[in-house]
Image (cartoon, rainbow, N blue to C red):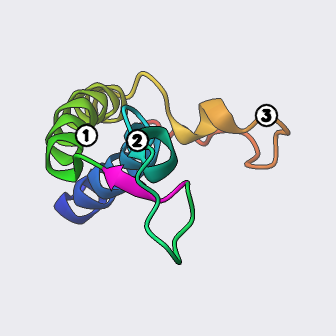
């Protein structure tokens, strides 16, 4: 795995985790009973984005480390995901 692919993998994991973490403990204007005129009742009042970004960073670092070890060790390769046999037989070179 190259440095670029490791960074891209981490970025994808981070954003997917962030999208999962955002709605946790979200306090909307409707929940608090302070709906500002011209806004939707579902608009966030307290979003705690800084704390959620730190939580996301920690969770995604753990997930990334697990995936990194699996990919680099070779436990799961691209041929393991070839469910339809489209890659053909593996060519093994002998000396």
Indicate the quadrant containing the C terminus: top left, top right, bottom left or bottom right. Answer: top left
Q: Which residue is mark 2?
A: 32
Q: Which mark is residue 56?
A: 1
Q: Left of 94 or right of it: where is 51?
A: left
Q: Left of 83 or right of it: where is 60?
A: left
Dominant secondary structure of the residues highlighted in magenta in the image: strand
Q: Which mark is residue 75?
A: none
Q: CA distance from mark 1 to mark 3?
A: 32 Å
Q: Which of the two labelled residues, at mark 1 and mark 3, occupies the earlier sequence position?
A: 1
| Quadrant of res 21 | top left
Characterize the local packing of mark 3: few (<14), some (14-19) or many (20 or more) Cα atoms within 10 angstroms: few
Q: CA distance from mark 3 to mark 2?
A: 51 Å
Identify the residue at horizontal 15%, vertical 41% (top origin). Answer: 51
Q: Secondary structure at mark 1?
A: helix
Q: Which residues are magenta?
A: 42-46
Q: CA distance from mark 1 to mark 2?
A: 26 Å
Q: Is residue 43 magenta?
A: yes
Depth check, mark 1 against mark 3: the one in front is 1
| Quadrant of res 62 | top left
The image position of residue 93, as x and y in percent, is 48, 41
Q: Which residue is mark 3?
A: 83
Q: Secondary structure at mark 2?
A: helix
Q: Which of the two labelled residues, at mark 3 and mark 2, occupies the earlier sequence position?
A: 2
Q: Secondary structure at mark 3?
A: loop
The image position of residue 34, as x and y in percent, is 40, 53
């Amino acid at each position: 795995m190259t440095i670029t692919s490791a960074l891209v993998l981490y970025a994808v994991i981070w954003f997917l985790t962030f999208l999962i973490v955002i709605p946790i403990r979200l306090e909307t204007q409707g929940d608090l009973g302070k709906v500002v005129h011209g806004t939707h009742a579902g608009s966030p009042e307290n979003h705690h984005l800084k704390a959620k970004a730190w939580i996301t960073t920690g969770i995604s670092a753990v997930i990334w480390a697990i995936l990194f070890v699996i990919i680099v060790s070779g436990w799961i390769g691209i041929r393991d995901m070839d469910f339809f046999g489209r890659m053909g037989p593996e060519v093994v070179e002998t000396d």
